Each structure stands twice: as C-alpha cells, then as structure tokens.
Image (cartoon, rainbow, N blue to C red):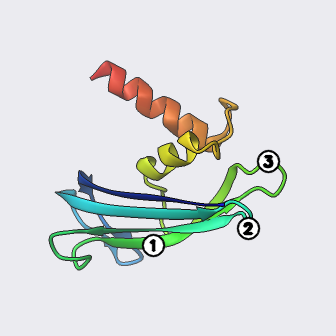
C-alpha cells in the first residue's frame, strides 16, 4: 500500500551543510512525503514556495523496519521534520515505546505545545 503526505504551511527553517548554516527564516514550506508499506521505504521533499526551493530545499529517504513496520531510518537531512514524523505516527509507523527516538520527539513537541 502507498500513502502520501502533501502539505503547505508557514514555517521557520534554516539550511545547514558542510559550508555552515543560514540564519532562521520564515516562509511557506511545501512538504511531500510518500511511503510504500509493502517495500518498507519511501521518501520526502521540502522546499520554500516563494523561491521554489532556491532558498530552502531538502529531500531524502525513509525506511521501515522489516519486522514491525516502524520507521527505523531516514537520510537526506540532519533532523527529520516533525510534521513528517507526526504523519508517520498517524499512519501507525512510529513505535509507541516512549524510549523510541521518534516517539521522544513527538512527546517533547507535545510538552512544548502545552507549555506555550
């Protein structure tokens, strides 16, 4: 089965690479992600809408564990965007164990939201 995320949202972002990092900027990001659950892999792409990716662009891969179907790896960015992690959680591909790396990110984000 194939599933897909396609959202456009106002976001704060910055780009990092071996060359260093840009400052934080605000703009509209388009985020698409896809996953083939039978093959256990997928990908994602994010870019700023205003410059069609000239100011901010990222793409990468997603991999599910063969045994349980939970997200076990990603590539292409230093930190996977939380909206992709939350989408994968809604689709049942994030481990519910509170010690799981991705579950910890979701819990931390929820705690931050409550405190604001």
- Which residue is situated farthest in the top direction here? 115
Which of the two residues, 91 or 52, is positioned nearer the viewer here? 91
The percent position of residue 17, horizontal first and vertical second, equals 39, 73
* Residue position marked by numbered label 1 in the rendering: 59
Instruction: Report how far apart the C-alphas of labels 2 and 1 lie in the structure.
Output: 19 Å
- Of the 4 image quadrants, the one containing the C terminus is top left
Q: Which residue is pictured at 35% across the width and 20% down the height?
A: 114
Query: Marks 2 and 3, Cα distance to the nearest angstrom?
Result: 13 Å
**With respect to residue 7, does 85 lie above or below?**
above
- Sooner in the amino-acid sequence: mark 3 or mark 1: 1
Label at residue 68: 3
Quarter of the view holding residue 58: bottom left
Q: Which mark is residue 95?
A: none
Position of the N terminus, as image quadrant, is: bottom right
Residue 46 placement (x, y as % from top left) = 36, 67
Q: Which residue is mark 2?
A: 39
């Amino acid at each position: 089965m194939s599933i897909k995320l396609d959202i456009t949202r106002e976001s704060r972002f910055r780009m990092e690479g071996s060359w260093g990092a840009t400052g934080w900027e605000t703009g509209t990001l388009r985020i698409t992600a896809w996953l083939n659950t039978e093959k256990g892999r997928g990908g994602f792409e994010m870019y700023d809408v205003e410059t069609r990716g000239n100011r901010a662009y990222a793409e990468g891969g997603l991999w599910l564990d063969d045994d349980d179907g939970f997200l076990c790896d990603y590539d292409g960015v230093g930190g996977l965007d939380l909206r992709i992690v939350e989408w994968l959680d809604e689709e049942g591909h994030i481990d519910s164990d509170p010690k799981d790396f991705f579950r910890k990110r979701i819990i931390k984000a929820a705690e931050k939201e409550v405190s604001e």
